């Protein structure tokens, strides 16, 4: 990688977390209008399963040692697609972004060879302000694959109790101490998401490991239809820095759709977020989802606020 005189590319360590976070906050503010990462997020990325910072990540520093770029790779399950992103300070690091991407693609080729695969598919996102980055992805051979729409709604003035669900539909919190309930939750999630063309299934054990030890279980819900589990809602903490409740996954079994299950789950999640003092609720929508959930989300008060495009490239294994 060619760098300006005096600049340095090196592997990151955990000591770099504050400096990396400053880079990511500059990038987030440019793309989103606000910081969307925490120090814990950076630390998690550097210590994630199937990631070795000494091989899978780079930082770039100016002559005075100030970091201006961070390239990361992610694949917690160690199967399926790789995810690559390059965060840069938009005013100081944009010129090195394409070169860091090339390094990461070389690493993906190596990872494919290590896994004994002929190739690996890699994805990378671009937000509307990142026109230069989108062009660099295209120049590197990536193609547009899908768009995610981010939606949000205010929780101000929300009634303390969610509206009554449709006949036969009940909603309750997940019982995390009950493995049978967790397995039902995973089964509904897995079965429902198989409608999405590029969904990559995860077995129960790997799915459970990726959840972590202590999520806010009281924000996870199961919907039943006539007493049988039919839908699930999984929350995450990714919106907490904005005081926003976040719906990570909403899934309803194919035979139980159009019965008000999804709306009932969302109403319960919104009520729980509001009871905790959250100002808003949000989620992301895969616009290739054949269940066309936008109309459901709009019906419960969610509105579009921004989008992100996902680009994809198939990288042959090193030596192939």
Image: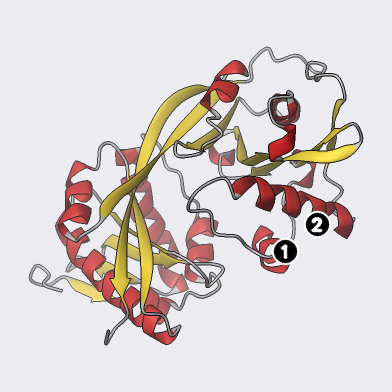
Q: In this view, does 105 lie to the left or right of 94?
A: right
Residue 90 horizontal/vertical position (percent): 22, 48
Residue closest to the eye, 222 or 5: 222
Residue in the picture at 22% in, 55% down: 137
Residue 206 horizontal/vertical position (percent): 67, 67
Residue in the picture at 77% in, 49% down: 185
Do the residues under discs 2 and 1 have CB atoms within 8 angstroms?
Answer: yes
Quarter of the image for residue 71 reads bottom left
Q: In this view, does 41 lie to the left or right of 228?
A: left
User: How many neighbours does mark 2 have within 10 angstroms: few (below 14), some (14-19), or many (20 or more)?
Assistant: some
Image quarter in which the C terminus is found: bottom left
The answer to whether residue 65 of the structure is visible from this angle is no
Give SS at disc 1. Answer: helix
**Residue at the limit of the structure toward the front, as seen here:** 255
Residue closest to the eye, 55 or 173: 173
Residue closest to the eye, 210 or 298: 298
**Residue at the limit of the structure toward the left, as seen here:** 5
Q: Is residue 212 above or below residue 193?
A: below
Residue in the picture at 68% in, 12% down: 157
Which mark, by number, is residue 183? Answer: 2
Q: Name the residue under label 1.
A: 204
Q: Is residue 193 above or below residue 109?
A: above
Give SS at disc 2. Answer: helix
Residue in the picture at 22% in, 69% down: 102
Q: How many marks?
A: 2
Image quarter in which the N terminus is found: bottom left
Residue closest to the eye, 182 or 68: 182
Quarter of the image for residue 34 reads top left
The answer to whether residue 54 of the structure is visible from this angle is yes
Quarter of the image for residue 231 reads top right
Which tag, 2 or 1, sits closer to the chain's start? Answer: 2
Q: In this view, does 123 lie to the left or right of 266?
A: left
């Amino acid at each position: 990688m060619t760098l300006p005189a005096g600049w340095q590319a090196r592997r990151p360590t955990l000591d770099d977390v504050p400096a990396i976070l400053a880079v990511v906050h500059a990038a987030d503010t440019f793309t989103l209008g606000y910081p969307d990462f925490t120090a814990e997020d950076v630390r998690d990325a550097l210590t994630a399963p199937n990631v070795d910072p000494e091989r899978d990540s780079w930082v770039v520093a100016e002559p005075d040692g100030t970091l201006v770029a961070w390239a990361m790779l992610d694949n917690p399950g160690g199967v399926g697609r790789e995810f690559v992103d390059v965060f840069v300070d938009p005013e100081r690091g944009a010129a090195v972004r394409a070169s860091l991407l090339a390094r990461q693609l070389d690493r993906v080729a190596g990872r494919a060879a290590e896994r004994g695969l002929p190739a690996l598919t890699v994805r990378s996102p671009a937000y509307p302000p990142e026109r230069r980055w989108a062009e660099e992805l295209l120049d590197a051979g990536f193609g547009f694959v899908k768009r995610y729409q981010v939606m949000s709604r205010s929780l101000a003035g929300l009634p303390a109790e969610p509206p009554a669900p449709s006949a036969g539909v009940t909603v309750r919190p997940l019982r995390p101490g009950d493995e049978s309930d967790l397995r039902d939750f995973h089964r509904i999630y897995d079965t429902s998401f198989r409608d999405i063309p590029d969904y990559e299934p995860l077995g129960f054990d790997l799915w459970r490991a990726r959840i972590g030890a202590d999520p806010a279980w009281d924000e996870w819900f199961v919907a039943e239809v006539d007493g049988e589990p039919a839908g699930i809602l999984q929350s995450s903490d990714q919106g907490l820095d904005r005081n926003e409740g976040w719906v990570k996954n909403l899934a309803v079994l194919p035979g139980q759709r159009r019965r008000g299950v999804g709306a009932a789950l969302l109403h319960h999640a919104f009520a729980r977020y509001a009871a905790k003092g959250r100002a808003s609720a949000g989620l992301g929508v895969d616009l290739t989802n054949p269940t066309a959930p936008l109309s459901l989300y709009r019906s419960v008060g969610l509105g579009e606020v921004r989008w992100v495009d996902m680009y994809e490239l198939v990288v042959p294994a090193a030596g192939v």
